[in-house]
Amino acid sequence: MHNKRHRRWARPLTIAALTFALAASAVQAPAHAEEATPPSKSAAPQTDLTGSARSAILMDADSGTVIFEKNSTAALPPASITKIMTMLLVMEALDEGSIKLTDKVQASEYAASMGGSQIFLEPGEQMTVEDMLKGVALASGNDASVALAEKLAGSEEEFVKRMNAKAKELGMTSTHFVNCNGLPAQGHVSSARDIALMSRELLKHEEITKYTGLYQDYLRKDQPKPFWLVNTNKLVRFYTGADGLKTGYTGEAKFCLSATAKRDNLRLIAVVMGEPNTKTRNAEVSKLFDYAFAQFTNVPIYKKGDTIGTLQVQKGAVAKLPIVAKHSYSVLVRKGDAKGDIRHELVLDKKVEAPVKAGQQVGKLIVYRGGDVMNEFPIEAPASVDRAGWWKLFKRSTGKLFLNE
């Protein structure tokens, strides 16, 4: 990709102390941006681990706790890290059932015309959603990104509207998308903090690392010359526990990376932007990971699939909804810190009346250390509940009347 415009470099800020960024599931800035008690007062590293980066952030994926940040809200060109949002919308569509991995995606003339990193789609060529997703995750295919965007929304323009709507929902205040692949465009910007937020949201779809964690694979396997895919993120091969997420480069953006790694029960997200070369980019992300894995651990609260509680729905076709953890809930602590005084409380809204939409916030899970709040996680309705008909409400109320007698 080529440099099409010049941007003055931002002045790095001092390293922030350990702060809480955003809590779990489907994060929205106004409702979900809660302060958390830091694991310790001296948790942030005392040196700049990303001396060559224009901006950077290190975050615990489960709790959203920020361990390190540098100039993290500066709006900068994100290059192909943009594709994290593209992959997120694809994974959400798969969850919703609007597309399947086996569905065919046909490349348009426009999709096939994309330059830069690509899987060399021919106009009219068809691949499955899964193969296109591999083309995005491993090879950073600009053409595959556009083909998927057109499959989901009919056009890239419509898909970009969805991208920006999702960015707003996640509280990505320094982000504006112009395309789905990160090719240079006026006004196409994001920040290290925002990229960490969308990376965290993508990682809630745990199956994504099946693709982003691959080092190599093949497309067009049924053809005489299969197309060899090699992951542009070399950390998945050379850093223990790394399994994603996305690299980026343009002349303007320089070398960028949103990386994730997991060891034991601790998953980290590290984002660097504006690095001078791939070697420095990978080395500085590795430093961030090394620091956090050496210093911190996670205390699990709930694991995915655990029953958290029961939601009472007034005037609903269903009177009760079991609340089940859609992902793991945990809090970050410094190794050696006491864990025995950590407790949690589920606080559901007192009056939840139908209709209820799936994903609607209905309460929060509060985690305490002693008398201090460590984290607050939003709790969402696991399913939609329509309003009950008058006859059902009548039978329900008369049943209660007789029970009261």
Image (cartoon, rainbow, N blue to C red):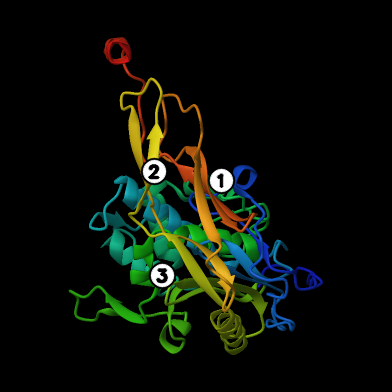
According to the picture, the residue beneath numbered tag 3 turns out to be 137
Q: Secondary structure at mark 3?
A: helix
Q: Position of residue 91 (x, y in %)?
A: 38, 55
Mark 1 belongs to which amino acid?
Glu
Instruction: Report crowding for label 2: few under 14, some 14 to 19, many 20 or more residues within 10 A (C-alpha).
Output: some
Residue 303 position (above or below residue 283): above
Instruction: Report crowding for label 3: few under 14, some 14 to 19, many 20 or more residues within 10 A (C-alpha).
Output: many
Q: Is residue 354 visible?
A: yes
Tell me how far mark 3 sits from mark 1, CA to CA: 23 Å
37 left or right of 153 in image: right
Residue drawn at x 46%, y 66% is: 142
Q: Nearer the viewer, mark 3 or mark 1?
A: 1
In the rendered image, the quadrant that contains the N terminus is bottom right
Query: Quick one: label 1 or label 2, which is nearer the N terminus?
Result: 1
Between residues 131 and 206, which one lies in front from this camera angle?
A: 206
Q: Position of residue 351 (x, y in %)?
A: 49, 26
According to the picture, the residue beneath numbered tag 1 turns out to be 169
Mark 2 belongs to which amino acid?
Gly
67 left or right of 202 in image: right
Between residues 232 and 108, which one lies in front from this camera angle?
A: 232
Residue 269 position (above or below residue 33): below
Q: Position of residue 176 (x, y in %)?
A: 63, 53
Tell me how far mark 2 sits from mark 3, CA to CA: 36 Å
Tell me how far mark 1 sits from mark 2, CA to CA: 26 Å
Q: Quadrant of residue 218?
A: bottom left
Q: Position of residue 151 (x, y in %)?
A: 36, 50
Query: Quick one: label 3 or label 1, which is nearer the N terminus?
Result: 3
Between residues 213 and 220, which one lies in front from this camera angle?
A: 213
Q: Nearer the viewer, mark 1 or mark 2?
A: 2
191 left or right of 139 in image: right
According to the picture, the residue beneath numbered tag 2 turns out to be 309
